[in-house]
């Protein structure tokens, strides 16, 4: 078959990630007194016990730090100072408001991880009395501050601000070049279309990355030139349709050639009626087909089971399913975390994530990585110059990636590689192409 030109994104950090021998995302570990095997490790060592293989966060964040330190050795980028670029998180709520207690903890985790990557963390905290006008005034300032790589609002807002500020309208004012959490609806729309964009939503991106690692390293799936596994031939179920997780995840998976089932939601299979028996039958028919289940409901509003707090029970899943469960909600006593998938169903899975240490750390890592990319976007002319200065390395790297994906010879892919190189350095092309190209060649430059 003749070689077919590839014109989507090419490069990124995942090609490096998947090649690391020390990185093994499948581990056996204890969690809350139980022993598990085939856990997909989003964080890394558990409580510092280094006998566990490294996980997604434990590999990528130190690599970002190494790359930050190396920037000064690339002539075109020697003046870029990572520690002067900030990842900004905006937290709104009074200190004694229990509704934002979890947000405070999460912001602390993001801040610590950001600093480990070589960037600076910046937290702006406001009381619940802040007005819409005051928030817009601050946002205008942050949007124009070149030292801020990305900015995000920690939602929901607490107290009165949570009731009076239209956060959707507010997030739509975020500069899309700084929208590192994918909160602007323009970012969401570009993701849905598969169009050129600066960022993806962090949680869907982290979920796809974890699944990709498993598929590439354990199942021999083809690795696309953009660093994501091909989901071709797999039936994939998305449970949940929120604007920042379920819906964008569903659209991403379509772009990566998955046969998508769902997204499941409260009206699936009911014809608008509340017939729980019919709903459960339809849910089960879909879930039993799925090769991969992505759980992202966050809580259990469906009440289709009388005897379980979970949505997916063991009898709803087929043997060998891959489970990527993003849900971590605290119900009943407020202490025990619940996902969407009943732990008893894990015996059927080829691999799965736990309620903690899985998708959460992958989401934070994605966010920090996008902050790191934001630094490069703020210096895009210098990035394009660095890519142009290393033309032979870029074309050689692109050629190998394209040939491997197409199952073709490097001579067949060489012309396509040069075309994509020219796109990356073109000032009229989207900045993502130059940034992805630079990330792809970092391993060669650092040898």
Image (spheres, rainbow, N blue to C red):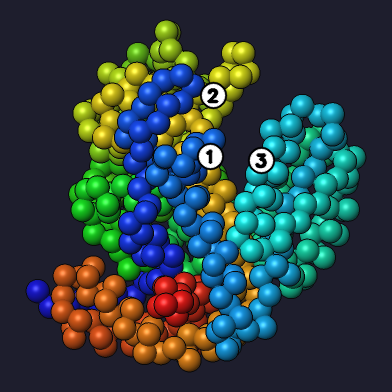
* Mark seen at residue 48: 1
Report helix, strand or loop for mark 3: helix
Query: Label 2 belongs to which residue?
Result: 337
From where the camera sits, is residue 370 visible? no
Q: Position of residue 339 (x, y in %)?
A: 47, 27
* Residue occupying the point 23% across, 68% down: 405
**Quick check: 191 above or below 394?**
above
* Mark seen at residue 106: 3
Report helix, strand or loop for mark 1: loop
**Quick check: 201 above or below 120?**
above
* Residue occupying the point 9% across, 74% down: 1
Report helix, strand or loop for mark 2: strand
Q: Are marks 2 and 3 in contact (CB under 8 Å)?
A: no
> What is the spatial separation of the Cα atoms under label 1 and label 3, in whole angstroms?
20 Å
* Residue occupying the point 65% across, 44% down: 109
Q: Quadrant of residue 392?
A: bottom left
Q: Residues within 10 Å of mark 2 (few under 14, many from 20)?
A: some
* Residue occupying the point 50% across, 50% down: 57
In the image, farthest residue toward the left: 1
């Amino acid at each position: 078959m003749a070689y077919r030109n590839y014109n989507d994104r090419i490069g990124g950090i995942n090609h490096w990630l998947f090649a690391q021998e020390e990185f093994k995302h499948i581990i056996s570990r204890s969690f809350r007194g139980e022993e598990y095997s085939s856990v997909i490790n989003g964080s890394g060592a558990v409580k510092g016990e280094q006998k566990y293989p490294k996980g997604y966060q434990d590999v990528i964040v130190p690599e970002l730090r190494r790359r930050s330190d190396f920037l000064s050795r690339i002539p075109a980028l020697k003046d870029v100072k990572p520690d002067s670029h900030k990842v900004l998180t905006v937290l709104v709520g009074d200190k004694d408001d229990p509704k934002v207690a979890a947000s405070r903890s999460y912001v602390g985790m993001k801040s610590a991880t950001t600093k480990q990557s070589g960037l600076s963390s910046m937290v702006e905290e406001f009381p619940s009395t802040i007005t819409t006008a005051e928030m817009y005034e601050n946002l205008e300032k942050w949007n124009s501050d070149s030292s801020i790589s990305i900015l995000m609002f920690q939602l929901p807002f607490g107290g009165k601000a949570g009731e009076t500020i239209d956060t959707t309208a507010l997030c739509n004012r975020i500069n899309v070049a700084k929208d590192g959490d994918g909160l602007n609806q323009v970012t969401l729309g570009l993701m849905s279309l598969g169009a050129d964009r600066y960022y993806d939503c962090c949680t869907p991106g982290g979920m796809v990355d974890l699944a990709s690692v498993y598929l590439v390293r354990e199942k021999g799936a083809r690795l696309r030139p953009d660093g994501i596994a091909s989901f071709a031939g797999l039936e994939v179920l998305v449970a949940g349709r929120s604007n920042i997780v379920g819906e964008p995840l569903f659209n991403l998976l379509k772009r990566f050639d998955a046969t998508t089932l769902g997204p499941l939601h409260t009206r699936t299979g009911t014809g608008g009626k509340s017939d729980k028996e019919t709903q459960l039958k339809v849910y089960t028919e879909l879930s039993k087909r799925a090769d991969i289940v992505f759980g992202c409901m966050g809580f259990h509003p469906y009440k289709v089971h009388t005897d379980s707090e979970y949505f997916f029970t063991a009898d709803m899943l087929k043997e060998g399913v891959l489970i990527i469960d993003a849900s971590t909600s605290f119900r009943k006593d407020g202490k025990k975390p619940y996902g969407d998938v009943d732990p008893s169903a894990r015996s059927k899975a080829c691999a799965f994530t736990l309620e903690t240490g899985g998708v959460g750390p992958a989401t934070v890592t994605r966010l920090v990585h996008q902050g790191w990319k934001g630094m490069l976007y703020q210096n895009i002319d210098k990035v394009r110059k660095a890519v142009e200065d290393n033309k032979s390395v870029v074309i050689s790297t692109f050629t190998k990636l394209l040939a491997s994906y197409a199952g073709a010879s490097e001579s067949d892919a060489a012309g396509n590689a040069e075309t994509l190189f020219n796109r990356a350095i073109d000032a009229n092309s989207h900045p993502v192409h130059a940034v992805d190209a630079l990330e792809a060649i970092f391993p060669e430059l650092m040898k």
